[in-house]
Image (cartoon, rainbow, N blue to C red):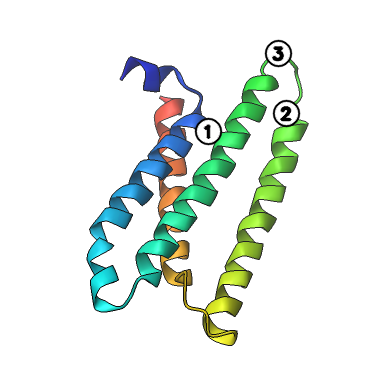
Amino acid sequence: MKFFLKLNSSFKIAILTYLVSLVGFLALLFLFFIGHMDIPLGAILAGAIIGSTNLIVGFIEKSNANKDTGVLAVIFVGVRTFIILGIMVVLALMYYRWGMPYFNIISFVAVYTVNIIITVIVHIKERR
Protein backbone atom coordinates (compact mmCIF):
# COMPACT_ATOMS: atom_id res chain seq x y z
CA MET A 1 0.00 0.00 0.00
CA LYS A 2 2.87 2.37 0.74
CA PHE A 3 4.21 1.75 -2.76
CA PHE A 4 0.89 2.76 -4.29
CA LEU A 5 0.65 5.95 -2.23
CA LYS A 6 4.12 7.08 -3.36
CA LEU A 7 3.22 6.93 -7.06
CA ASN A 8 2.21 10.00 -9.04
CA SER A 9 -1.43 10.41 -10.01
CA SER A 10 -1.11 9.04 -13.56
CA PHE A 11 0.45 5.80 -12.33
CA LYS A 12 -2.32 5.44 -9.74
CA ILE A 13 -4.97 6.02 -12.41
CA ALA A 14 -3.31 3.45 -14.70
CA ILE A 15 -3.16 0.78 -12.00
CA LEU A 16 -6.75 1.39 -10.91
CA THR A 17 -7.95 1.33 -14.53
CA TYR A 18 -6.17 -1.98 -15.12
CA LEU A 19 -7.73 -3.44 -11.97
CA VAL A 20 -11.24 -2.20 -12.71
CA SER A 21 -11.13 -3.48 -16.28
CA LEU A 22 -9.81 -6.85 -15.11
CA VAL A 23 -12.58 -7.13 -12.50
CA GLY A 24 -15.12 -6.07 -15.14
CA PHE A 25 -13.75 -8.66 -17.55
CA LEU A 26 -14.00 -11.38 -14.93
CA ALA A 27 -17.52 -10.30 -13.99
CA LEU A 28 -18.59 -10.40 -17.64
CA LEU A 29 -16.82 -13.66 -18.41
CA PHE A 30 -20.07 -15.63 -18.32
CA LEU A 31 -21.11 -13.80 -21.50
CA PHE A 32 -18.58 -15.90 -23.44
CA PHE A 33 -20.80 -18.91 -22.89
CA ILE A 34 -24.04 -17.31 -24.07
CA GLY A 35 -22.67 -15.91 -27.31
CA HIS A 36 -21.75 -12.34 -26.37
CA MET A 37 -17.98 -12.54 -26.20
CA ASP A 38 -17.67 -9.01 -27.60
CA ILE A 39 -18.75 -7.36 -24.34
CA PRO A 40 -15.96 -8.66 -22.05
CA LEU A 41 -13.42 -8.33 -24.86
CA GLY A 42 -14.40 -4.68 -25.34
CA ALA A 43 -13.95 -4.06 -21.62
CA ILE A 44 -10.51 -5.65 -21.46
CA LEU A 45 -9.41 -3.87 -24.66
CA ALA A 46 -10.47 -0.52 -23.22
CA GLY A 47 -8.68 -1.22 -19.94
CA ALA A 48 -5.50 -2.18 -21.73
CA ILE A 49 -5.46 0.84 -24.05
CA ILE A 50 -6.63 3.48 -21.59
CA GLY A 51 -4.46 2.14 -18.77
CA SER A 52 -1.43 2.03 -21.05
CA THR A 53 -1.94 5.61 -22.17
CA ASN A 54 -2.17 6.69 -18.52
CA LEU A 55 1.01 4.76 -17.84
CA ILE A 56 2.78 6.57 -20.68
CA VAL A 57 1.58 9.92 -19.29
CA GLY A 58 2.96 8.87 -15.90
CA PHE A 59 6.37 8.18 -17.39
CA ILE A 60 6.28 11.50 -19.23
CA GLU A 61 5.36 13.34 -16.03
CA LYS A 62 8.15 11.54 -14.19
CA SER A 63 10.70 12.54 -16.83
CA ASN A 64 9.41 16.15 -16.77
CA ALA A 65 9.68 16.36 -12.97
CA ASN A 66 13.14 17.88 -13.28
CA LYS A 67 12.03 20.51 -15.79
CA ASP A 68 9.70 23.45 -15.28
CA THR A 69 7.55 22.70 -18.31
CA GLY A 70 5.01 19.97 -18.88
CA VAL A 71 4.53 20.61 -22.58
CA LEU A 72 5.17 16.99 -23.56
CA ALA A 73 2.56 15.73 -21.08
CA VAL A 74 -0.01 18.22 -22.37
CA ILE A 75 0.71 17.24 -25.98
CA PHE A 76 0.34 13.54 -25.16
CA VAL A 77 -2.99 14.15 -23.43
CA GLY A 78 -4.26 15.54 -26.75
CA VAL A 79 -2.70 12.65 -28.65
CA ARG A 80 -4.27 10.20 -26.19
CA THR A 81 -7.68 11.73 -26.83
CA PHE A 82 -7.30 11.29 -30.59
CA ILE A 83 -6.04 7.72 -30.13
CA ILE A 84 -9.03 6.76 -27.98
CA LEU A 85 -11.52 8.49 -30.30
CA GLY A 86 -9.91 6.80 -33.32
CA ILE A 87 -10.18 3.41 -31.67
CA MET A 88 -13.84 4.10 -30.86
CA VAL A 89 -14.53 4.96 -34.50
CA VAL A 90 -12.77 1.80 -35.69
CA LEU A 91 -14.70 -0.31 -33.16
CA ALA A 92 -17.99 1.23 -34.28
CA LEU A 93 -17.14 0.55 -37.92
CA MET A 94 -16.12 -3.01 -37.11
CA TYR A 95 -19.28 -3.66 -35.14
CA TYR A 96 -21.95 -1.93 -37.18
CA ARG A 97 -20.57 -1.55 -40.70
CA TRP A 98 -18.21 -4.44 -41.36
CA GLY A 99 -20.06 -7.12 -39.39
CA MET A 100 -17.09 -8.03 -37.17
CA PRO A 101 -18.49 -7.90 -33.61
CA TYR A 102 -15.27 -8.76 -31.79
CA PHE A 103 -15.19 -5.80 -29.40
CA ASN A 104 -18.24 -4.02 -28.04
CA ILE A 105 -18.05 -0.25 -28.26
CA ILE A 106 -20.51 0.23 -25.38
CA SER A 107 -18.28 -1.68 -22.96
CA PHE A 108 -15.29 0.29 -24.30
CA VAL A 109 -17.09 3.57 -23.54
CA ALA A 110 -18.16 2.23 -20.13
CA VAL A 111 -14.57 1.52 -19.12
CA TYR A 112 -13.53 4.93 -20.46
CA THR A 113 -16.24 6.52 -18.30
CA VAL A 114 -15.01 4.57 -15.28
CA ASN A 115 -11.50 5.84 -16.08
CA ILE A 116 -12.78 9.43 -16.02
CA ILE A 117 -14.41 8.80 -12.64
CA ILE A 118 -11.18 7.25 -11.33
CA THR A 119 -9.23 10.26 -12.61
CA VAL A 120 -11.53 12.69 -10.81
CA ILE A 121 -11.38 10.71 -7.56
CA VAL A 122 -7.59 10.39 -7.64
CA HIS A 123 -7.13 14.10 -8.33
CA ILE A 124 -9.55 15.03 -5.52
CA LYS A 125 -7.64 12.76 -3.12
CA GLU A 126 -4.31 14.28 -4.25
CA ARG A 127 -5.56 17.81 -3.48
CA ARG A 128 -6.24 16.93 0.15
- Residue occupying the point 30% across, 78% down: 35
Gap between marks 2 and 3 measured at Cα = 10 Å
Q: Position of residue 113 (x, y in %)?
A: 44, 57
**Residue 110 shows in this picture:** no
Q: Nearer the viewer, residue 109 or 30?
A: 30
Label 2 sits on residue: 70
Secondary element under disc 3, as helix, strand or loop, is loop
| Label 3: few (<14), some (14–19) or many (≥20) C-alpha neighbours in 10 Å | few
Residue 106 found in image quarter: bottom left
Q: Position of residue 101 (x, y in %)?
A: 47, 78
Specify the amino acid type for callout 1: Ser
Residue type, mark 2 in image: Gly
Q: Amino acid at mark 3?
A: Asn
Q: Nearer the viewer, residue 81 or 95?
A: 95
Instruction: Determine whether 91 is above or below 72 in the image.
Output: below
Q: Which residue is mark 1?
A: 10
Write down the residue under mark 3. Answer: 66
Between marks 1 and 2, how big is the CA–CA gap?
14 Å
Give the crowd class for mark 1: few <14, some 14-19, many >=20 residues within 10 Å.
Answer: many
- 34 left or right of 77 in image: left
Q: Is residue 113 left or right of residue 80?
A: left
Q: Give percent across and percent down for residue 121.
A: 40, 39
Instruction: Work out which quarter of the rendered image holds the N terminus and state it.
Output: top left
Instruction: Name the quadrant containing residue 55.
Output: top right
